[in-house]
Image (cartoon, rainbow, N blue to C red):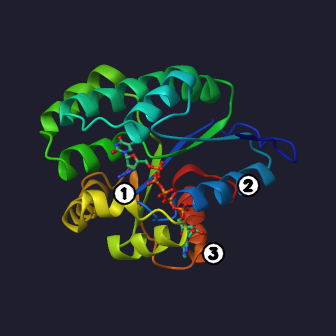
Amino acid sequence: MTAAPSAATPALLAARFITLEGGEGAGKTTLSKRLAEALAASGLPVLRTREPGGAPGAEALRNLMLHGHVAWDPVAEAMLMFAARREHVAKTIRPALEAGIWVICDRFADSTLAYQCYGHGLDAAVWRKLADVALEGFAPDVTLVLDLPPEAGMARALTRGLPDRFERLGKAFHARVHAAFREIAAAEPKRCALLDAAQGADQVFAAASATLRERLGAPL
Ligand code: Z5A
């Protein structure tokens, strides 16, 4: 999903890797579309992508993980997430950045920490080891963490007819994931910005734009 720039690309602005994180229904997809449109309108080439997925092999793993019928062992699930991520970085994200294309990615490694570790109980030390092997230090320039209480995310997801996942994983699970994203943002304030996602979409977009302007010099 590459949005073509509509004007001359601003000079000397290196391509950046931006990730969006948060629970289900927090508004990541909505925000990523608006940011990509705004960056493209200001003359920057932009690629929107998502995890798990974003490259052919990673999409195959996504199907296996999200639409298969296996109750994964948490370590196995985390290994699959990082296998998909490595493929995504190697085949899609790095080539785009090297070609000068800004990348906006819906979920990245923080989601594995939040879901597999805080949510499903995987030891964070395993996450760290897998991240070291799969990413070799590669990390987002900025992560926008969309902060929304799980009940509100569920209400939004219900409007899209997706109640099963919430019911399957339970309220306590989603509360742990919500707390995890807040902790991740607090632990890495240079990389992460916590945005109040309970606001309307226009306000969330304005807050995200201000963050990218201040931290990356993005022309938003
Ligand atoms: N997962 C994992 O376990 N480990 C990992 O490492 C990774 C992922 C990478 C991916 O699901 C699943 O994989 C996810 C985590 C796990 N699941 N679980 N459990 P996905 O890709 O199918 O979906 P998602 O990432 O959870 O996103 P989502 O449910 O599609 O939600 P969203 O993208 O954050 O929200 P949205 O689609 O933009 O908005 C939802 C609705 O709210 C929609 O009707 C919008 O119009 C509306 N909306 C959006 N913003 C607003 C505001 N500001 N106000 C009001 N309404 C709004």
Q: CA distance from mark 3 to mark 1?
A: 27 Å
Pick the quarter of the image with the N terminus.
Answer: top right
Residue 37: which numbered mark, if any? 2
Q: Are the residues at dot 2 and dot 1 in contact (C-beta closer than 8 Å)? A: no
Q: CA distance from mark 2 to mark 1?
A: 30 Å
Q: Residues within 10 Å of mark 3 (few under 14, many from 20)?
A: few
Asked which secondary structure carries label 2, the reply is helix
Q: Residue at x 55, y 33 (%)?
A: 54
Q: Which residue is mark 1?
A: 165
Residue nearer the viewer, 67 or 15:
67
Kindly tell me whether mark 1's CB lies below 8 Å from ligand 1. yes
Q: Which residue is mark 3?
A: 202
Which mark is nearer the camera, 2 or 1? 1
Marks 3 and 1, the one that precedes in the sequence = 1
Q: Residue 36 placed where, x, y %? A: 68, 51
Asked which secondary structure carries label 3, the reply is helix
Q: Are the residues at dot 3 and dot 1 in contact (C-beta closer than 8 Å)? A: no
